[in-house]
Amino acid sequence: MYRNSNTVAISIPHYALISHFILNTIVSIRVENLVKTYGQQNAVNDISFNINSGEIVGFLGPNGAGKTTTMKMLTCFIPPSSGRAFINNMDVELQAIEVRKQIGYLPEHNPLYTDMYVKEYLQFIASIYKLSNSNQRVAEMIELTGLQVEQKKKIGQLSKGYRQRVGLAQAMIHNPSVLILDEPTSGLDPNQIVEIRNLITTIGKQKTVLLSTHIMQEVEAMCSRVMIINKGQIVANGKPGELKQQFSSDIILVVKFNQALSNLQLKELKNLVNVNPVAGAEYQLVGKDEEAMKALVFNFAVKNQLMLSEMKVNENSLEDIFKNVTR
Amino acid sequence: MFSILKKEIRSFLSSLIAIIVIVVFLIANGLFLWVFKETNILDAGYANIDPLFDLAPIIFIFLISAITMRSFSEEKKSGTFEILTTKPLTDMSIIMGKYLAGLIIVIFAILPTLIYYYTVYKLGLPEGNLDNGAIWGSYMGLVLLSAGYVAIGLFSSIITDNQIVSFIVSMFLCFFFYSTFDYLGSFAIFKNTDFFIEWMGISYHYRNISKGVIDSRDIVYFLSLIGLFLWLTKIIFSSRKW
């Protein structure tokens, strides 16, 4: 395709050429109608997406939705049953060795050689990539991932957080342009999660990152885009903000008065807006227009000589979207 | 390939497997050759080290199975198999790296037995009066035989993620290829095909080479055996793609 466009360049208008060029250079991961079938079961069922270079994309989905299978296909571990996938325009099936040079992969559960020393292991991985400056890269990775103190230990002696760093270090040692991380923060404590997250955000500035996770806050904190996959199909794909708009329908206003409403007052409020009593003096109001609802509640309170002690908008969180689309 | 080879040898050394195998091999052979009454060279009175070459194939059935049992089983069990196969390495270079590492350890177990050769050489009357051709032929046969065993062991290791299963399968296959065909050939029902059946076994070719006559057919047999099992290993290795 690329070769053709060069030879017939004269007959193509400039803008077409430019857009063609841009499309070819900035798409890091391109997936076309990817299917993976295990026996009768479709683990991944006809998914297509593009990831541009420099994006950090969060791959969400319940367990068994096909996240790991998709990642395994992208990293050439298993071939797709049908459909194609490209990393930097190279086919994962036909140019597997080339593709593997371009990607850094952290598999699920982060498998490591527990009887190797941290430095020894990184040197081994560097030697696989035949890096000319392997010693320097190993030192850089140890510094980047904060393994200085632990570098002389055996991997088996490390805590889970440090093992995860070793996993990330081996994935990045050859400076790949695409990073595929399968649940990089699973099983870590909150501090470690923050550290690993910061690490990924730092790295993600120059690289394309596709990461899978179960933690919604993580996606909101790190990712420029979210893809939600369910039963092998992509059910949502977009920026976190866009998804919220797309999937939000009703606005929920939580209101707390200084005292519980009398039946009469409740009836009056119910005439104005849809009300669900929560507990005590707390009520949930459901409506479409946020501002109008706020005004209405305020006027109601003034009229009935009530005091508003609390009023907050319950935003549709990514978690709700996740629950909705993967049900 | 060399990165895998290096890593395997380091892991053999650091887990002491290599050392244990070499030490056990040398102790067992040393006992049979110099201490035990029935097989003792000193009492036998002949300047040869035949007991070594009779015994080594049997000891290697156990030891080589022990060396190779973890090579793929462990990677599969711990998941590092996925790390290796998503690196820019071809399937064959991973297999060959592991194969050569196993073979090198075995050769390092054989090398010290050259001291036995030197001892018998010195003890000969007159000095150096021994059948050199047969001994060097036997050494070559032993290396080829172990190369075959290592290939069988690798195959046994790739078919399972359980090291014990791999160990037992490997021992069985090595034993089967080493001596079963000899016994089968002696059965009356195989009267007309007995030569062919014996020909299929390792021991027939091993005996031939041990005489000091290097016949290209024997070499081809061993190379085919090695090739067959490495090829089977490759097939199972790629079976994740089915």
Image (cartoon, rainbow, N blue to C red):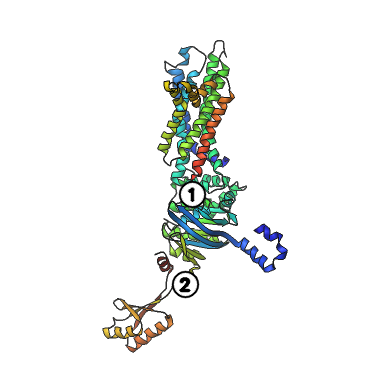
> Residue B14: image x %, image y %?
48, 38
> Residue B196: image x %, image y %?
50, 24
Identify the element where label 2 is drawn: helix
Chain of the residue where label 2 is placed in the rendered structure: A
Q: Is residue B212 above or below residue A36?
A: above
Residue visible at 53% across and 51% down?
A76
User: Of the residues shown, which amino acid type is indicated by label 1?
Assistant: Glu
Q: Nearer the viewer, mark 2 or mark 1?
A: 2
Res A131 visible: yes
Return the mark for residue A237: none
What is the CA distance from the residue labelled 2 to the residue labelled 1?
46 Å
Identify the element where label 1 is drawn: loop
- Mark closest to the chain's N terminus, 2 or 1: 1
Left or right, B217 with respect to A319, comes to right
Q: Which residue is more in the foreground, B8 or A17?
A: A17
Q: Which residue is more in the foreground, A282 or A17?
A: A17
Q: Which quadrant of the structure image shows residue B170?
A: top left
Name, please, the residue furthest toward the top. B126
Res A145 visible: no
Residue visible at 54% across and 47% down?
A125
Check if mark 2's residue and mark 1's residue have beta carbons within 8 Å. Answer: no
Which residue corresponds to mark 1?
A150
Quarter of the rendering occupied by the N terminus of chain A: bottom right
Which residue corresponds to mark 2?
A246
Name, please, the residue furthest toward the bottom. A303
> Residue A220: image x %, image y %?
47, 66
